[in-house]
Image (spheres, helix red, strand yellow):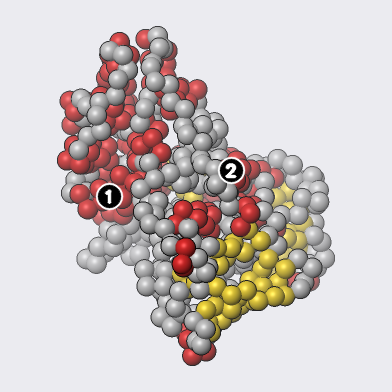
Amino acid sequence: MTQWPERTVVDRITATDDEIREAVAEAEVPPLLPALAYLTGDLSLLREDLKPDPLLIGMEQGGLSEEQQATARALAVDTLIAYRDAGSQPAPVPNDEVLLRIMEYAVGGADMAAYLPLLEEELAYRGEDRRAPAWRVPETRSDFNVVIIGAGMSGLLTAHRLQQAGVPFVILEKDRNVGGTWWENKYPGCRVDNPNHNYSYSFAQRHDWPFHFSTQDVLHGYFRTCADAFGLREHVRFETEVLSATWDDDDARWKVRVRIAGGAEETLEANAVVSAVGQLNRPKLPDITGRDRFAGPSFHSARWDSSIDLAEKRVAVIGTGASATQFIPEIAPDVGELLVFQRTPAWLGPTPDYHDEVSDGLKWLYAHVPSYSEWNRFWIFWRMGDGGLPNFRVDPDWQSGGESVSAVNDFVRLVLIEYLKAEFGDRPDLLEQVIPDYPPGAKRMLRDNGIWARTLKRDNVRLITDDIKEITPKGIVTADGEEHQVDVLIYGTGFHASKFLTPMKVTGRNGVDLHEQWAGDARAYLGVTIPHFPNFFCLYGPNTNIVVNGSI
């Protein structure tokens, strides 16, 4: 087994004052002073007047004003120059009390002691791996084996941990490569909507991401690299789809039925089964009358048909969710006419750097300032996770008519509406159609850097919010009776996200069928284990898919 390549950090800063100043000018400010306090041991850098407001951490630069940002940058420049001149020697790693103080300052929080072990792991300074097993299975138990279903983000991690512990395993992957959703989804514009420095393993951080939110090919490359670095490919059986898993009460083992390439079937046995199948891999097509009658090409975005030339075609897209809002702006300049059918608008989270490359200044900071990259990851992790909970927590006494769930949530709503007004203010017809009538956080929020408004305002794009009545051989008929004739139909209608473990058949003790036991309401203890299904574990399981984006 090989190892994840160690990060190369320049031990001594040799940059000029101006070079340091130019790099700091491009920094993400909220993690800057905490990183320098951690690096130098100088807690006077944690000035109260430069501390982020926890209610604003979701905003650009954590909601810090231009004046606060300028002051923080100047302080950081002076600190880095002094650090350089003193020989670039990091201070000793602080104790828990000091570390907690720095963490609470970084996010403007308080009473975060309960989070300290978790946050220390996420900080992962210099590639620490605190979750590596401290034990190994003795040779006498080497006959205990595990089947992992899926070679995506969770499946690869599970395999890595089992390998560290000396537990025999095999990964069953239905596709031809690792990567899961980042192998399957190849539509134009496909990219992650979680910052890369967070959307990666804490113990295998990459500090040279080309984008803040990388594209599908970059993400898939990361997971390919992980699989190779950890020596996992030799344990993967590709093009092997799991059909069923049945618990044998007499043998106390699982019988896993699979279909391999070519259609042949076989049965594997395992002491334990880990389902790492994810949620975003079974395309969902809408239940619309006449869907199969359309005479032209049609496909789901997750099964993008690149053989179809969309140039100058009249194209219809059903759906305006996460995938659709990525591929619609990509195809709009090329098609002749684009009809976008929207059932429900999504809240858009302002993200100016959504498509931006990581600047040279940031790359310099990551390479030359020990701990800055890790503290940036910590900052992202907290604001994307529990740091955002107050914005979406329900106040049972709050009265709003259903548009918000608390005073804080209503404030978020007003901020997001102001953003939509700024984007669509010159098109009141569109503005009315893009403001959701539900609370922020009730559905998945989407990232936007202004491209959605620019796309919908194009002369060849039309947003249609009338209900769809039926699909005909020539196009789509809406509730008002109008038939919209198109050449190509694309479904951006999401996935069967709530149908966990389908279409697999899972049978537990005494012949209990998992899907019958769930009866349409998937449940698991801590989202992982299920009564009557011994040694069967779910990753990204029921009720772990939370709104604040901290699931993985």
Helix, strand or loop status at disc 1: helix
Q: Which residue is mark 1?
A: 117
Residue drawn at x 52%, y 69% is: 143
Of residues 123 and 307, which is closer to you in this image? 123
Q: Which residue is mark 2?
A: 225
Of residues 511 and 216, which is closer to you in this image? 511
Left or right: residue 552 compared with residue 318: left
Number of the label disc, if any, that sits on residue 263 = none
Question: Vertical placement of 384 versus 208: above or below?
Answer: below
Of residues 378 and 163, which is closer to you in this image? 163
**Residue 68: image location, x then y, percent:** 27, 26
Residue drawn at x 41%, y 68% is: 527
Question: Vertical placement of 279 versus 358: above or below?
Answer: below
Helix, strand or loop status at disc 2: helix
Q: Quadrant of residue 61?
A: top left
Left or right: residue 87 compared with residue 268: left
Q: Quadrant of residue 137?
A: bottom left
Three-letter code for the amino acid on which mark 2 is drawn: Thr
Find the residue positioned furthest to the bottom: 510
Q: Residues within 10 Å of mark 2 (few under 14, many from 20)?
A: some
